[in-house]
Amino acid sequence: MTYVDALPRLPLWGSRRSQPRIDSASSVDPTQAHQELLSDDPEPTRIEIKVHGEAPAELKSSVRQLNWLLNANSCSGLLPVTVPVLSTALKILIQTLQESTPTPHFALSTEGSLQIEWHEAGYDVEIRVDKQATAHLFIGDFNVPSNDWEGLLDFEGRSRLLQVIQELSKPEE
Amino acid sequence: MTDYAGFEDDPTILAEDQLLRRLRPGQLVHDGNLGRDRPSSISMSNDQEGLVMSIYLEKELPSKGLTTGDVVSGHPGYGIAALKADFCRKEEQRVARDPVSNSPRPHPCDPAHGVVAGTKKESRQRHLARSALVLLEPARYQQSR
């Protein structure tokens, strides 16, 4: 198994839940809250995240869906999804999913890109991790189309993404 | 400048003609804003060479003894989305016939193969995906707790 370094943590899990911590392996830095575990296969067909304590349901559900997708497309002639692409996608999920965030949908392209998407509550959110593992963000606002935004998932993109994820994570009234 | 990979638009493909696009497993999303399932925008990207998107011309199928379902013959778990030719043209795409012959992996629908040629930035892929109708659902993840 290959340990993929986690990005610096951001306090995104909210105050109601303590930070999940990585399980197993003595090499794990205890200051890191999580770490992805990817197989040594450069084109993995299964991913795993180990977390101390209770893993957030949204994260577990996302990993299950990703594993289903990788398996369902493993013989379909798609260019395979690589470790860097999966690693980037997992980091985005870990850093953005909040308690009560709806589980996103995942889809693969023919050329090895992976897309994470939500289409609800008046928002279209699409994060495309291309085959170079660069993440692009699109936010569509059905209520205020002038708020639509598209660009790299850099500092500004991440800030915009977090704002929309908070909106998506609000309990239904 | 849009790259059409050398394809010219074929005027014998009429505005209302349906273009059938294969959907791979998982390329179907529920769009709560539209209130229906639709293809993921990622399904409307150009093929691996990055020049064109493969489709099958629905109107060509019956004359060859084929049905819409034959498009996914030999592709378990795949689905089918339908696009209108005129919508693709409005998105600055060219629609052309491109029958396949002598393929190393022949398919019954090869004679009805065509392309939607043109650069497809992600915004264009989104437009195409929103306009598409799902004729056959691809395999999708069944959430379990």
Image (spheres, coloured by chain):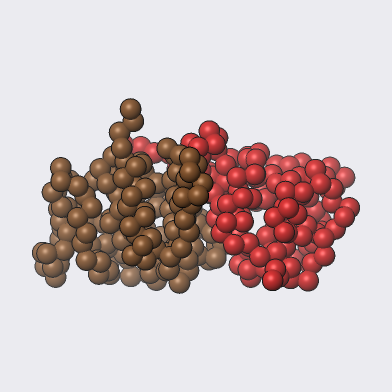
Residue at image position (27%, 63%) is A37
Residue at image position (57%, 56%) is B123
Q: Position of residue B83 (x, y in %)?
A: 70, 46
Task: Report which quarter residue A25 is drawn in.
Answer: bottom left
Compared to residue A59, the image places residue A88 above or below, namely below
Provide the letter of the chain coloured brown: A
Q: Position of residue B74 (x, y in %)?
A: 65, 51
Report whether A143 appears left or right of B104: left
Task: Report which quarter residue B114 is drawn in.
Answer: bottom right
Front-most of residues B90 and A88: B90
Chain B colour in the picture: red
Report whether A37 appears left or right of B82: left
Q: Position of residue B8 (x, y in %)?
A: 82, 65
Task: Report which quarter residue A44 is drawn in.
Answer: bottom left
Report whether residue A10 is seen: yes
Compared to residue B117, the image places residue B141 above or below, namely above
Residue at image position (61%, 50%) is B127
Q: Position of residue A100 (x, y in %)?
A: 28, 39
Q: How many marks?
A: 0
Residue at image position (50%, 49%) is A146
Q: Most extreme residue toward the top, as rendered? A: A173
Report whether B126 appears left or right of B95: left
In the picture, which quadrant includes the N terminus of chain A? bottom left
